[in-house]
Structures are given as C-alpha cells and as structure tokens.
Amino acid sequence: MLPELADLLGTARVVRLPMRTRFRGITVREAVLFEGPEGWTEFSPFVEYDDQESAAWLHAAIDFGWRPAPAALRDAIRVNATVPAVAAADVPAVLDRYPGARTAKVKVAEPGQTLADDVARVRAVREHLGPEGRVRVDANALWNVDEAEHAIHALASFDLEYVEQPCATVDELAEIRRRTRYMDIPIAADESVRKASDPLAVARAGAADLLVIKAQPLGGVHSALRIVAEAGLPVVVSSALDTSVGIAMGAHLAAAVPDLEFDCGLGTVALFENDVADSPLVPVDGAIPVLRPEVSGLRLDALSAPDDRRDWWLDRVRRCYRIVEHTTAL
Ligand SMILES: O=C(O)CCC(=O)c1ccccc1C(=O)O
Ligand SMILES: [Mg+2]
C-alpha cells in the first residue's frame, strides 16, 4: 500500500495560499499536494510541527491518495462558519462567506485580546445567526481553569453549543467540566485528541463530552474512523486550514462517521483568497458535497511556492516518509 518515495515526490506540488483574514497567526498557508491512484491528496502540517508529529499527516495524505475511502453514508456535510478572532464589527462580513450556515465556531482567548473582545465577538455572532443559530467557541487551550470558568460564565448567556479545548491538559479539561457542569455547556476536546500521544486518553478519563476529529493529524480517514469507534463519544469532524483537497479528505471522513449530530469544521476554504480548484469546496446552503474536487493545473502553477519553500517541504516529506515507513499500518 505504501507508495515508493520517488512516486510520492514525482507528483508533489507545493502551493502557497493567501488568507483573507489572519487565522492562528497565519496569513499565508503552505501545502503539498500529491496525486495518487485515488486522486489528489494533501500534506500540510503547520510549519512549526516536528517530524514525528508531521509524519501522521503524511500517513493521512498517503491514505487518502492511495487507499480507497470507506463507504460514504451521506453525500453532503453540514458545516459551521469559522470566525477568526476578528473585531465584532467584522463578524457579519465573515459570516456572509458561509451562506446558509446555521452554526458558527468563534475563536476566543486570542493572545493580546481581552474577554470583553470575546464577549463582543460572540454577541455579534449570536445576533447575526438569531436564536436558532448554534454558537460554539474555541479557546485553543489558552485559558487556565480559573480563566476558563470566568470566561465560560461570561459567554453562557449567548447559549453556547459547546466550548472547544478551553484548557490544555486532560486533567484541566476534567476539572473545568466539573466546575461548569451546572451551566450545562458541553466541553469538546481538540488538541487533547490530535496532539496527544494517546488520542483516546481524554475519552477514557471522561474529560470531554465530545471529540473534535481531524483526518490529517490523526493519520488519515481510516485511522480517525477507528478512533471515533473506540472513543464512544459524539464527534465533530474538523480540518486544519486545508486546501479543497484536504477538506475533501475531511468530508470523506465525515461521510463515513456512523453518527454525525454536529455540523463540521470543514468550511474553511471560505477563509482563503484562492484555492487549487476551479470549483472549491466552499459551503453552499450550509453544506459541502462529499467529492474529490477537480484540481486545476493552471491554479497549481499560479499558486506554486518559491523554490526555497518547495525544497523545504520536499525535505520534510522525505524525513516524514522515513518515519511512516517504520510505523505504517497502511
Ligand atoms: O473547526 C473549524 O471550524 C475550522 C478549523 C479550525 O478551527 C482550526 C484550523 C486550524 C488549526 C486549528 C483549528 C482548531 O480547531 O483549533
Ligand atoms: Mg480547535
């Protein structure tokens, strides 16, 4: 199942996509695309990740390009709008890029901002979506337990669907979950799943009500599906600021999850100025279709990364391939 390194590298295209709005400190996102027998696939670990962590992302890329996807149980996936840590006044412009979305995920706890900024942003989202909208927030592990308790209490009046990764560790998640139980707001684990040596530890500890599941960091569609089955918790399938190709990987995972009660974080192509497909996987009527987008050669050329970045990424692919070779379940 594992392709030869030369075959992998032979189809590699390294692209750079400018973002419309800064997200997680990122204004330009780089990705490697490969074309396997199943179609185009993506490798895009964040630049600061080490090779060990990035190897799971390469495993995922190979899985999606070289192994048939599991049977799809649905042909469209409802997605949430993703609202970066923008000023409240800019919220309507962000939400307008997600036509038909009934759910929004709002970034909070951004370094350099205050709880008042978070409250104003979440209020603006709630006002825009109306009482029937679903509003969730994501703190990316940036609060300690006391800060989280204070912030969740301040945000509770906006009727939160859940709070994603309020604190960093499994113990802290368990503690904040105990402390906020009276508010009846579920706690979701993201980094505690995708960056943990044991992605099931948080479920086993009873430290979260639901899990955020991402195909690339969890080693691909098949291995993520196994984690979903073993965790026994509800899941949200999300992504990592991918091109339409990586989003398609997430859509195929979401399509195969037995129970999908939450809208998925697969609408983020809307945050980019450009994409590798003429028909990008952006939400229409609040959903994306489960398909592999047609990648455009012209767009790949226009979005090509400069030579030094291409060399950096291909070296990274070589190093990660050596790790995958020795650990693979493919
Ligand atoms: O879930 C979403 O709405 C979009 C994806 C997202 O938020 C994200 C994208 C890149 C890196 C981290 C995260 C995150 O969920 O923390
Ligand atoms: Mg998250």
Image (cartoon, grey):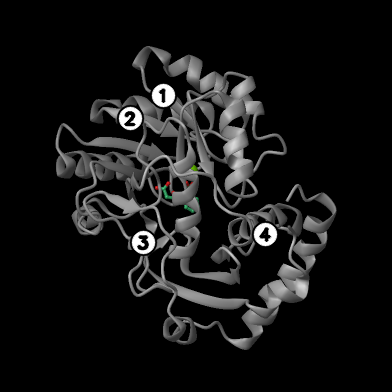
Q: Are marks 1 and 2 in contact (CB under 8 Å)?
A: yes
> What residue is pinned by disc 2?
161
Q: Residue at x 36, y 17 (%)?
A: 184
Residue at the disc numbered 1:
186
Q: Do the CB atoms of the residues marked 4 and 1 lie less than 8 Å apart?
A: no
In the picture, measured across the screen, residue 163 lies left or right of residue 44, that is: left
112 in relation to 198, above or below: below
Q: How far from the left and from the top, in percent, is residue 46?
A: 59, 61
Residue at x 33%, y 51% (from the top left corner): 83
Gap between marks 3 and 1 measured at Cα: 29 Å
What residue does disc 3 label? 281
Q: Which mark is residue 58?
A: 4
User: Label 4: few (<14), some or many (≥20) within 10 Å?
Assistant: many
| Image x and y of residue 150, in percent | 40, 26
Q: Amino acid at mark 1?
A: Pro
Instruction: Name the residue at 39% across, 49% down.
Output: 113
Of tags 4 and 1, the one toward the viewer is 4
